[in-house]
Amino acid sequence: MKDIFHRLRGALSFSYGQKLFLLATVPLILAVSVISIVVTNQSRDLAEREIAALEAQLIATKREELKNYLSIARTAFVNTYGRAAPDDEAAKLEVSQLLSAILYGQDGYFFVFDYDGNNLVAPRQTYLINRNWTGLEDANGIPITDELIRIARTGGGYHSFDWPKPSTGETGRMIVYVNGLQDWRWVVGTGIFIDDVQQTVASARAEVESRIAQTSVYIVGIVIVALLGVFLSGLVINIRERRLADVKLKALTQRIIDTQEEERGRVARELHDGISQMLVGVRYALELTKRRFQINDDRVGNSLDKGIIGLGGAIQEVRRISRDLRPGVLDDLGLGPALQSLADDFAQRTDVTCSVETVVFRNRLDQEARIALYRIAQEALTNIERHAAAQNVTISLKGKRSGAHLIITDDGKGMPAQKSQARTSGGLGLRNMQERLEQIGGTLRIRSSTQGTMIEAQVPLTHMLRPEAGSNDDDNQRKSA
């Protein structure tokens, strides 16, 4: 299970370039998606309102057309109806024949029902004539005959329902306008199918959807172009950064090699100028002791003492070189005692007063931080010895909320402003101090004037470790970092 988890975690881990690409593209995609949804919804709502207005306008036109048709038909039989009595069958027959003869279009005609529901006129659908259609409804349950009678009784009006077309027999939506002949108890009306209106509305909706789809395609195309732009820009930047990183890496590698060769040269000079000469002196003293021993010279002891003294000096020199390369007190006792030892050697060697102020840390610094701060102090003291002409030096090591702080101050002549960011002639140099701290997430600040120089190195809290298990207060007092 753990292997599967680690594999999934590895598969889902992204490189820096991928994270940068996702950081640039995900908000863009989300923003464009939201904009696309909003634009689509608003466009569809606006189109629906316009289509609804168009439909209402077309239906209103149809209604006016129906009303005009019925007015024309009423004008044709108004004289006959006006002179006839309620039971004048001859007049009714004349009006029925007149309405049956009036046809328009493929499906236009006039129909007549009496108030009892009997159909009297239906020229295009003669199967309706002389039959009672009370309770007739369309496929959707909308009442037809009863509703037409009710509308006619109340003075006339419009009604809409599904009805088969006389020309094709297919069912379509129909709007009718009826009026009542109250003396004869007749419902006179005509209707018109609104398929063309529905087709116009459907065509408008299809055009709207087509435009929305086309707009969506444009948006997607713009997003793809933008993503390609981001990708290509990121690729160019990545290639450029890689080239710069390669150049910096080559420069850093060359500088490391130069530093190593410089350090090797320094150690070689110290071995040649110090230990080698001491050992040569010891060899001469031992050879002199051998010759005097062979001739029983009383000065054998003096030459032997000189050899022993020279050997002791060589041993001390080896210890000094070893301590400069890697002080054992740094690993054994911690950073505070190591800085104290470094300051004591510096004061003894240069006759410059060097004081160390330390505060016991609640937690200890890890190895990287200890080495970095020690090397910074070592290089700072070397620079002070070579360039500052100082009389007093103070080393302060304290722990704060932001981390560990190492401050080195002197009362020397300071350094030129242009040198504060440059590499010095020996040791690690100020530039290497900065790089050491950058590797562990720390910061380096240098302030210099004619009254002296202050170097402040800060190490973050991430390099502060808890005391080891079993450590007591005495151990914490003994270890200052």
Image (cartoon, rainbow, N blue to C red):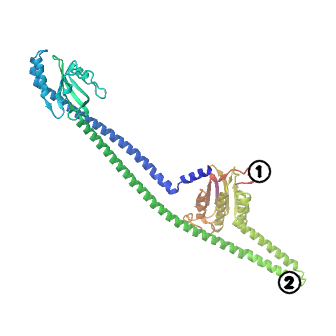
Q: Nearer the viewer, residue 416 or 256?
A: 256
- On screen, 114 above or below 221? above
Image vertical order of residue 95 relative to residue 27, above or below: above
Per the model, the C-alpha gap separating discs 1 and 2 is 56 Å
The answer to whether residue 343 is left or right of residue 125 is right
Q: Nearer the viewer, residue 265 or 97?
A: 97
Q: How many marks?
A: 2
Dominant secondary structure (helix, strand or loop) of the stretch shown in magenta:
strand
Mark 1 is surrounded, within 10 Å at the Cα level, by few (under 14), some (14 to 19) or many (20 or more) other residues, namely few
Q: Of all residues shown, which one is farthest toward the bottom?
A: 295
Q: Which residues are magenta?
A: 403-407
- The answer to which of 218 and 309 lies nearer the viewer is 218
Count residues near mark 2 (Cα–Cα under 10 Å), then give few for <14, some for 14-19, many for 20+: few
Of label 1 and label 2, which has the lower sequence position? 2
Could one spot residue 414 in this view of the protein?
no
Q: Quadrant of residue 279?
A: bottom right
- Residue 291 is tagged as 2
- Tell me: residue 362, above or below residue 375: above
Which mark identifies residue 34? Answer: none
Residue under circle 1?
474
Q: Position of residue 281 (x, y in %)?
A: 78, 78
Task: Give the residue drawn at x 31%, y 39%.
Answer: 46
Name the side, left or right, on which 126 lies relative to 285.
Answer: left
Does the magenta portion include 283? Answer: no
Q: Secondary structure at mark 1?
A: helix
What residue do we see at 86% from left, 77% from top? Answer: 302
User: Which part of the image, by quadrant, shows the C terminus?
Assistant: bottom right
- Residue 405 place in picture, x, y as percent: 64, 54
Which kind of residue does numbered mark 1 sit on? Asp
